[in-house]
Amino acid sequence: MKYSLLILLGCLAMLLPVRGAENQAFYRDILVRAINEEDSAKQIALVKELVAAGDELVERGLAAWRVSELFVNTEANGLKVPFVLDAQLDSDGKAKAIRLTDGKFITDAAGKPLLFRANELTAVDNNSRIRRAIKTTLDLFAIGNPVPKLRRDAVIKLGQEQNPEYLPHFQNRLKTETDPEVIKALNEAVALTQTVDADPSIRNAAIVTLGKMRSINAHDFLVQLETKAKADRAKYGEETLQVLQKTIVQIENYQRWGTLFGTAFRGVSLAAVLLVAALGLAITFGLMGVINMAHGEVMAVGAYTTFFVQGVFGSGLLFSLFGKTVTVKGMGLTGGGFDCYFIVSLVASFVMAGLVGLALERGIIRFLYKRPLESLLATWGVSLILQQIFRHTFGSANVQVDAPGFLQGSLVVDDVLFAYNRIFIIGFAGFVVLLTWLLLTKTSLGLQIRAVMQNRTMASCVGVRTDRVNMMTFAFGSGLAGMAGACMTQIANVGPSLGQNYIIDCFMVVVLGGVGNLVGTVSASAGVGITNQVLEPWLGAVLGKITVLTAIILFLQWRPNGLFVTRSRSLD
Amino acid sequence: MKPSFSKILAGAAAGLMALTASAADTVKVGVLHSLSGTMAISETSLKDVLLFTFDEINKKGGVMGKMIEPVVVDPASNWPLFAEKAEQLLVKDKVAVVFGCWTSVSRKSCLPVFEKENGLLFYPVQYEGEELSKNIFYTAEAVNQQAIPPVDYMLSEGKKKFYLLGSDYVYPRTTNKILKKYLKSKGIPDSDIEEIYTPFGHTDYQTIVASIKKFAAGGNACIISTLNGDTNVPFFKEFANAGLTSENCPVVSFSISEDEFRGLPAKQLAGHLGCWTYFMSIKTPENEMFVHDFLSWVQAPKVSGIDYTVSGVDPKGRVTCSPMNLSRMGVYLWKQAVEKAGSFDVDKVRDALIGQKFKGPVCEVTMQENHHLINDVFIGETLPTGQFKVIKTFKGVAGEPFSEKFLK
């Protein structure tokens, strides 16, 4: 019995391709008949028959018909053949005609393709009823779309129409579907459609199924149904109402958990963004005591480096250097090769920003270690100069940095979204903190840095080259800021004012955490990030931000040195 | 040989005569757009298109035989400075007309000046309405020309839930207030309308996108966005990452035109909708000419007929957009009115402007008694190229600034 079934399946599989080719001709013929049909009721019936066609040309013809871009050509042998125009126009605005029966261009006697201009042709008539029928057919077409994601979207959309006509199509598809996501969507669509069934047993079973599936998509429909059922108890019956109420509670509980995890993730992710942005400042301002107003612009250096590396890996870029236009030829990579640009740019932006930091320290800041307020003014001036350099080099408009393939989209676990770029930033923040911690505690440079920060004169006395340590520390802090800038390209705008948008948040986090304390910076960013995300759904983005700021001000009134207090001479 | 004194005198006199002659042959026109600060990105394009239009008109003989002489000032995105610069244009330079302003707050700032000095201002950018000054002509789209048509379109597409998302300032708030009333009048209950604002330059759209995802879960939802400027980038990035698309939840953006697209990742916005009274992609001979002429003009910008150096025109990647078209049509409407009135006098020109018709690049517009245009409205789908494909046209929509007149 088992074997015979297998053989049967095998035969069917062998038959399929042949059947496919026959199908093609068969459905294209139906389309031609539908177009040439005079009676609109028959037309609609024919259009509905096309549901199972799954042929690209038929789909194209129908889509064109719906928007009045389908035309008919009477050929030499008297046949009326429908055609659509090719998307490619020549200089006269004319296009070749694609015959819908075989997908080839219509040619004249000599075999040269005929050219048509769209506005000189008369489109095949349509009316709202036919258009609606075409739309339904096209929607159902999408169930057969080869891309699972599009297929799933189509199924979800059709399910929400709760149209019993679609049920057999869903059930047919379920027999052959292999993608788990689509199967889930199909089951949901079937159940959702059955909730409006007249038969109470089918209806109730469908509602229970939706509850078991924890279907968030169905929630609104069930609530509507509940309102109707309450209004008309006689029609829907007590049992349906009870099942409904139970299911709605079930789904809402599930939703609540989803919201909780979602908020937690969003809070952690915002915290990671703040941490990545502020870590460089925690070094230059926190450890070294330089009020570095150019921190944001150093981040922007990293972001523009990413833009540059992207251009080199991709299709090249154009910028002007001191008034001269420079063209950089790209390697023209695509796909995985191109995606590597981001990894390279993380390193490149660290180096580039580090160099900028080095130059900044050697050129200006080293003269101002004893005059913190003047370093504030000087670095602010540097930030303005850097902004203007960005404007002159890359233009005042924002530049586009594309997300590499592996940072697009999101991971969905039980209806909670984890966007890949956010996951990456969280991981990256952890990595950078670890790196910094290792550097400060496990290396001799770290030992020297700590020595210099705690007591510069004493460190100098025991032979530490404080000047060099300062230089390295500032360059490292700037390099971290550069990497942060590279990360920011994935979530924010890259423009001359990128730094301005982050500088306040950065200072806020460092000061709140306690100047000179890495643990403080980490906890402060976590606190600010999570509080912000918890408050936002209640208070809205504007008020949420104000509340957080007020809370920080009040906190600093109470503890002026921040969360963790470090005692150090350099800060006195 | 030493030139004789009389010759110098004669030369000077001739020069003076030429000077007075040229002064008599020009008419001063003010351009009041921010060329620096946050709004410069948008407003500079309007300054460019105005100078281009003056060049077009001067080439054809000017206005009543007089060459247009632009007086360009920079209010630097500083709202009070708009009033000062307007005063300077009207009192010191004595310009015949001013073209300018982008944000509503800048218009409100210089409105009292125009009323006090009896000046004339043409305002070209879509706005929230609820205002009518006898000294301002609004070629801009009023709410019923830009906000109501796409909402109607969404309703006809079967959308039942509306998420109104905007930047936190006067234009989005007023527009959304009107839209909410309108939606209610169309039978959309309060529970199916969400209204959310974010600060300017907001970058963290996680929570909002999560709430949109929840909002759209039941299907038939759409977003009406009045988000302004580059805050759209993080929004659309987050939106796409959450698996939302134009198919399952379309976004209609009121503040994104072809010009704004230059700084946005067009790929991520493809398929979403925009609503304007002009698109660069509309194929008419007039529009093709406008686009072609403007694009070649920016390569070698100049204003013919007068001694004027144009500066700060970026020739790279330029486009035309609705506010630019409306700016240009404003100049032509003013020119026609001046010629009809036979005078540059503000009161006479104002009367002559009413009923003035102009055949623009995409359709003919008429200035109504309420100082707003009758104009065609187009809903367009955005393409990955940063252009729009028209998917619906509303013919001859009469602009109406006061919402109580079209909300019944």
Image: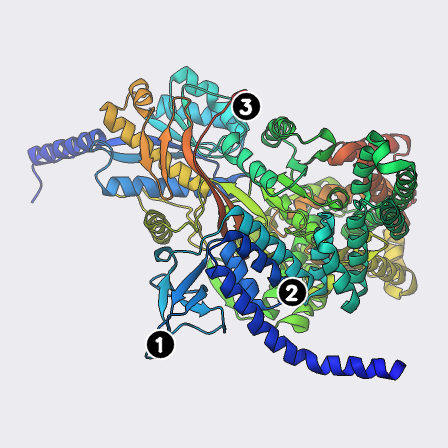
Q: Position of residue B30 (x, y in %)?
A: 37, 31
- The three-letter code of the residue at mark 3 reads Ser
Q: Which disc number belongs to residue A112?
A: 1
Q: Distance between the residues labelled 1 and 3?
A: 58 Å
- Secondary structure of the residue carrying numbered label 3: helix
Mark 1 against mark 3, which lies toward the viewer?
1
Mark 2 against mark 1, which lies toward the viewer?
2
Residue indicated by mark 2: A52
Tell me the subunit letter for badge 2.
Answer: A
- The three-letter code of the residue at mark 2 reads Ala
- The three-letter code of the residue at mark 1 reads Lys
Seen in the picture, residue B107 relative to A155 is either above or below; the reply is above
Residue indicated by mark 3: B403
Mark 3 closeness class: few <14, some 14–19, many ≥20 residues within 10 Å? many
Q: Position of residue B99 (x, y in %)?
A: 40, 32
Q: In this view, does B127 lie to the left or right of A187?
A: left
Please name the residue shown 53% across and 29% down the image.
B104
